[in-house]
Structure formats: C-alpha cells, structure tokens
Image (tube, rainbow, N blue to C red):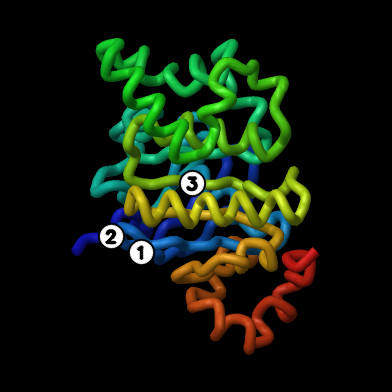
Amino acid sequence: MEPVIEFKYFSFKYRAQTQPTLRDINLSIMPGEKVLIVGPSGSGKSTLAHCINGLVPFSYPGDITGTLRVGGKNPADLGLFGISQIVGTVLQDTDGQFIGLTVAEDLAFSLENNLVPQEEMFVKVDEVAELVDVKKLLDNAPRELSGGQKQRVSMGGVMVDDVEILLFDEPLANLDPATGKRAIALIDQIQKNRKSTIVIIEHRLEDALYRDVDRIIVVGEGRIVADTVPDELLITDILENRGSGNLFT
C-alpha cells in the first residue's frame, strides 16, 4: 500500500524569510490513518498543514526542496482546485468557510460548482447532514449556529466531495472542553464510516487524546522530533524538552 501523504527530505522557506520554516521533513501517512500533529507556536506545524492542502505554494509562495506527494500526486501540479478534490480542510475559524445563506446551501455549494444533478445533490446533502448531525439545521443561517454546530456544518461542507483526506486545523481552539470532546467523537465516527485519512493539527493535546489516534507527530523548530504512538510519547520527556507544555493548556 502506498502512502496517501509522503514527504521526502522536504524543506520550505517563505519568500520573506531568511531561514527555512520546515527542514528535511520525512513523513509518510497511510490511507485510513488518524494522525495528530502537535508542536508549540512557530514550530512549523501549520506550515506542514499548508503544504498538505496546497496553500503552500499557491497562497504562500516560497522555496521548496525535496518532494511531497498527496494522493500520489505533486500538489504543485494539481492547483488549489485539484488538491481540494483530495484534501478537505476544516479551519479553526469556521465562519471563514461559510458561503451559503443556509446550512443546506452551504453543504451543496461545491456540488453545484461541480454541476452535480439536482436530485443527486439532494441525496448527497441529506447523507452528509445525517452523518454530521445537522439535518434539523438545514434551513438555518450559519450565523445563527453555536460554535459546535458551525464546526459540524464545516465538516459536512468538505465531506460532500468524498475527499480522501480530512485535515483539521486546530479544530478545538474555539470550543469549550465538552464541545471539543464531542467534535473529536464526530471525527472518530467520520473515520469509521468513511475510512478517510484524518490529519489533526492541534495545541490542546489532552482533548485530542480523548479519542484514539494512530500516531502523534511532534514538530519542533521546523523538524519532526517524534513520530510515535500516544502511549509511548506520554512516557517520554520529548514534549517537556521541546517547550511544548502549552500543548496541555
């Protein structure tokens, strides 16, 4: 089986910077894995996410060395639209993702863009709304929703395209602990139902560990400093030594 995400000796430097943000990244993520990427502010974890979803190099240009394959392809060859068919991103600020006037319109947006027949679109929206538990909210405006409801709609919006990879960029940052645990439970359910590859970028490690992840990748100073399973990571001093105490706050 081939990795669905594969970095090989990958480095990236933003044009405005003198030093690389990512250095010699070697990382393989297999189809169906759930991987948590953690690290302190400025460690490079968000840049790693931007490489996966194509924001690097299309929105954030810079110098790349090494190779990256997502879904077996070079993101630079796909363009943002092409990579969005493989990677669905749920942002920390979900308000920035809403386009439709109602939840139903928002869920249907990418299907309309892809000229999906209306009957098929209705079926797809209903299926995804059921999965993310927003069927009762389809007529509501996104601005009327709670933080947890907005996140479920945001998840649904990227799932309608049957993407291979779901990338969550600090999904718990704006949620209270109880809502955060429900969000993690939903991510767990999505993985079981869709067999998607899940990549979570997160500070609040304790909430992310409420549900099982296959691996934890610790990023520090632009490098991968640990790639291990949760139980092994938590008995080491890697997080403490890397100044990552804020991962638990």
* Contact flag, marks 1 and 2 (Cβ < 8 Å): yes
Regarding mark 3 in the picture, which secondary structure is present there?
Answer: strand
Question: In the rendered view, would you say 64 is above or below 188?
Answer: above
Q: CA distance from mark 1 to mark 2?
A: 6 Å
**To which residue does mark 3 refer?**
167
The reply to whether discs 3 and 2 touch (Cβ–Cβ < 8 Å) is no
Q: Residue at x 27, y 19 (%)?
A: 120
- The answer to whether one can see residue 164 in this image is yes
How far, Cα to Cα, is label 1 from label 3? 15 Å
Residue 121 left/right relative to 137 = left
Which residue is pictured at 64% across the width and 32% down the height?
150
The residue that disc 1 covers is 28
Position of the N terminus, as image quadrant, is bottom left
Q: Is residue 8 visible?
A: no
Q: Amino acid at mark 2?
A: Pro
User: Which of disc 2 and disc 3 is earlier in sequence?
Assistant: 2
N-terminal label among 1 and 2? 2
Q: Is residue 132 left or right of residue 242?
A: left
Residue holding disc 2:
3
Three-letter amino acid code of the residue under disc 3: Leu
* 56 up-or-down from 235: above or below: above
64 on left or right of 220: left
Q: Callout 3: few (<14), some (14-19), or many (20+) C-alpha neighbours within 10 Å?
A: many
User: For this rendering, which residue is in front, 204 or 12?
Assistant: 204
Question: Which of disc 3 and disc 1 is earlier in sequence?
Answer: 1
User: Residue drawn at (36%, 13%), measured in percent from left and top?
Assistant: 112
